[in-house]
Amino acid sequence: MSLIHWQPLKDLETLRHQMNQMFDTWTHHDTGGAPGRGMTWTPAIELKQTETDIVLKAEVPGVDAKDLDVQVTENAVSIAGSHHAEERTETEGMVHCELRYGQFQRWVPLPTPVHYEQAKADFKNGILTLTLPKLEPTQQPVFKVNLEDKLRTTATQNRLDDEHRQQTAHRRAEDALETMSEGDLDQAVRETVTQDRQHEEHRQDAVHMRAKSEG
């Protein structure tokens, strides 16, 4: 018997699991785990959990340890091998002996991840027992976001951007007044520019007052 740490393809795992479920009803229905005529034989499985381990037992009568191939992943176990059974019947003093041979494989998904490299196997009286230590879930680090700091930083940045825009507009208004001659501007235009500058100054004063109140 070999115990191998195996990493199969996910699609193959799913296919084998579905096939096992489909054949289980035929294989173990009222047969006590023995293969019937025309039926594909697979070992009966018992799966139990403790606080620290998953214990899997497989009934493989008539199979030698050397004919077993056990492969373990983090989430599943595969049990394969060669099975042979002898059926003897006696009728009217005549003994009829029939031998059955075949390959089998059983794919068993596990309820929780396990340390597959720490798996332990025992085989006695046709019963295979696997003890699989459970894999403890890793706790991901958690970062707590301070919403007050985030909001304060955002408000400060918005205020600085607003002040920069207002200062730029103020300088442009002053430059316009300095470069325009009295002959080029009539009274209406001059009053409009002056009002715009006063409006910008008022907004800038309001921003400074808000900044002082927040500080």
Image (tube, rainbow, N blue to C red):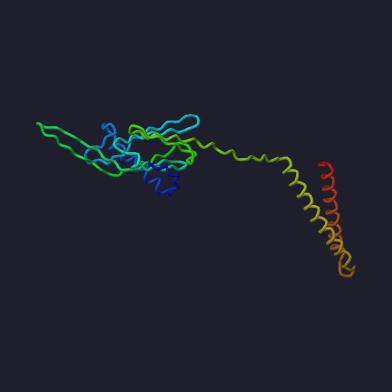
* Count of marks placed on residues: 0
Residue at the bottom extreme? 183
Front residue of 66 and 52:
66
Task: Look at the picture and state if 52 lies above or below 152.
Answer: above
Q: Position of residue 89 (x, y in %)?
A: 16, 33
Front residue of 89 and 33:
89
Q: Position of residue 189 (x, y in %)?
A: 84, 63
Residue at the top extreme? 50
Q: Quadrant of residue 82?
A: top left
Q: Residue at x 79, y 51 (%)?
A: 160
Q: Position of residue 59 (x, y in %)?
A: 33, 34
Q: Position of residue 50 (x, y in %)?
A: 47, 29
Q: Quadrant of residue 20?
A: top left
Q: Residue at x 41, y 43 (%)?
A: 71
Q: Quadrant of residue 212?
A: top right
Answer left or right for 165 relative to 142. Answer: right
